[in-house]
Image (cartoon, coloured by chain):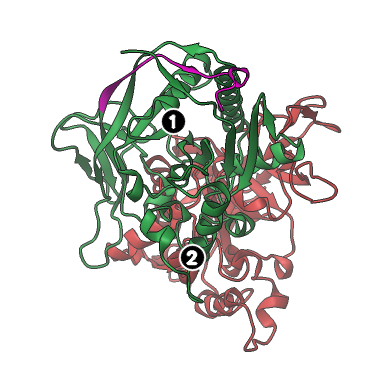
Chain colours: A green, B red
């Protein structure tokens, strides 16, 4: 593949508290605001606490999950007096950092999340975006404290529902395991390291550095698995099996245990070999997801270089 | 010490969901109700979902922490239209399983809790109660899957605020680490094992068995430590230090790290050697407690025996 040249990434947003009980992002953003971080080399940095009311309440959301509100359809629907708080706030964020899909949108949006799953550090990426793939490769090559992986969502931009889709380029940083409402220093430090590495890459890129192309592995969701449920009450009747718990991204083979019912029986995996992730994520109980199952794919991407600001390519 | 003889423990309550997002107790109680467990030998078993509205909302509580509502003062205060839901529910529970301090109260009340702290399995006991100390010793001698410890609260019964104080004898089972809103099979199995062992002990005791006295270790709280906070905003400025995190009940010495600030500085323990527990418990952020510090004490207790039902001692 040939080298691809990109304009500088001049406007960057680092966001946390999109889910108000995922504390790494809340404290990361507050710390950056306290230290008045608003510049990384030639790039301007905006730090945003995305869902302040949910942060105050220490809940995922007030009325509905804001991280499902950033589709074109929802962002363009008129507000009424009874519109949920998060729809209102999503429009504010879109006005501040977007509009999504426009030339006015920030060049890069990084949204910080936590999971109760043992997923280490994951970048969640939309389709194939050379910029975010290069950032992923850079973080992965530098971080040693935890495994770094990528999850690719194959959703066209207008239907992309999560906050990072508002930026011209964007990714979610998903880091765990951490209970909701709790901040762990080890997890906070992973987030800080990944944000620092993103800034480091950004400065080099904006200074005109070139980055070698190559290939990376990523996971792409095939399907989701719900908990076994009581057909009458719809309540769950089993927990994730101890042999699956905390084993995110470890290949699940037919016959491997997936659930242990509250009366002690083991449920086994049926179907093809796939990689489980988001195993026992707290917020997915209400979404009826015990875990996702993914295929591993290889993504190729070209060498890239930024026009340095001094190139005068504006 | 001499052998002490007790009447049978004929009425027993197993309770869960006192905090609506601590899932082991919720699923344990539901499973017992599904299996219609209402008898253990000669004892009748009542299973109770203590705070059903909080369970439905998957929150610790709706209006206030119900597990602080069982003082004599609160239980006897008249209800008004604006009384918090939990005060109302506490009175209902006191009517069903108490009244606290009366002859009508259940003989034994076991209330199941979870913590995000790495505390293994703890029995929380009020003052010196030979029955609960014997149950503690029994569980400790039989369980191998996790450390079993006791925390003793030295509060006179009228001021005792937690649900288990409604029974003639009572203890809380506190098991972790588990995120709020999540059920882990390993933690669920520990709770199940402890409940099963309690029932086993109960049946032997009610059949007239004798149990040897002895001594056990317990932890008793000296003081609590809050997070470092910003004097202006009152927001926390540090997380539990990685060297303290997950090290509940490991002796904390002067100079040992306690916090790591979000800007990277280490805060150290000052004062005497004590045992930390409830380290980074989610629900204690709002109570301004980062961890408790305890002394280790030794409790002596006599041999006991139950009058068997066939003794005709009623």
Considering depth in this image, is A241 or B262 the residue closer to the camera?
B262
Q: In the image shown, does B307 or B144 lie closer to the viewer? A: B144
Whether A82 is drawn above or below B61: the answer is below
| Residue B270 rendering spot, x and y as whole percentages | 85, 32
Q: Which mark is residue A63?
A: 2
Q: Residue furthest left?
A: A271
Chain for numbered disc 1 = A
**Residue A160 circle label:** none
Q: Residue drawn at (54%, 59%), measured in percent from left and top?
A: A89
Secondary structure of the residue carrying tag 2 is: loop
Are labels 2 and 1 on one chain? yes
Residue A249 appears left or right of B111: left
Chain holding disc 2: A
The answer to whether mark 2 and mark 1 are in CB contact below 8 A is no
Residue at (54, 26) in percent of width and height: A8
Q: Which residue is mark 1?
A: A122
A266, B107: nearer the viewer:
A266
Residue range corresponding to the magenta coloring: A296-314
Q: Residues within 10 Å of mark 1 (few under 14, many from 20)?
A: many
Q: Is residue A168 above or below residue B313?
A: above
Residue B224 placement (x, y as % from top left): 77, 46
């Amino acid at each position: 593949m040939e080298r691809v040249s990109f304009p500088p990434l001049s406007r960057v947003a680092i966001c946390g508290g999109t889910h108000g009980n995922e504390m790494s992002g809340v404290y990361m953003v507050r710390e950056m605001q306290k230290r008045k971080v608003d510049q990384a080399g030639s790039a301007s940095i905006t730090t945003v606490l995305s869902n302040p009311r949910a942060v105050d309440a220490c809940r995922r959301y007030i009325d509905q999950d804001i991280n499902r509100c950033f589709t074109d359809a929802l962002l363009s629907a008129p507000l009424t007096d009874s519109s949920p708080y998060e729809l209102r706030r999503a429009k504010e964020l879109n006005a501040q950092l977007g509009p999504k899909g426009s030339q006015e949108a920030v060049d890069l949006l990084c949204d910080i999340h936590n999971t109760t799953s043992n997923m280490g550090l994951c970048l969640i990426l939309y389709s194939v975006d050379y910029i975010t793939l290069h950032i992923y490769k850079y973080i992965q090559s530098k971080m040693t404290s935890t495994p770094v992986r990528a999850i690719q969502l194959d959703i066209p931009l207008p239907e992309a529902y999560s906050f990072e889709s508002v930026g011209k380029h964007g990714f979610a940083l998903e880091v765990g395991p951490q209970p909701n409402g709790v901040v762990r220093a080890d997890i906070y430090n992973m987030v800080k390291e990944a944000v620092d590495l993103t800034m480091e890459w950004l400065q080099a890129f904006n200074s005109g550095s070139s980055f070698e192309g190559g290939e990376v592995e990523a996971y792409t969701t095939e399907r989701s698995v719900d908990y076994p449920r009581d057909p009458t009450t719809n309540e769950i009747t089993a927990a994730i099996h101890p042999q699956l718990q905390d084993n995110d991204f470890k290949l699940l083979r037919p016959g491997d245990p997936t659930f242990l019912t509250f009366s002690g029986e083991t449920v086994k995996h049926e179907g093809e070999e796939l990689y489980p992730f988001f195993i026992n994520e707290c917020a997915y109980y209400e979404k009826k997801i015990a875990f996702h199952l993914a295929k591993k794919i290889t993504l190729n991407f070209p060498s890239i270089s930024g026009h340095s600001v001094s190139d005068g390519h504006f």
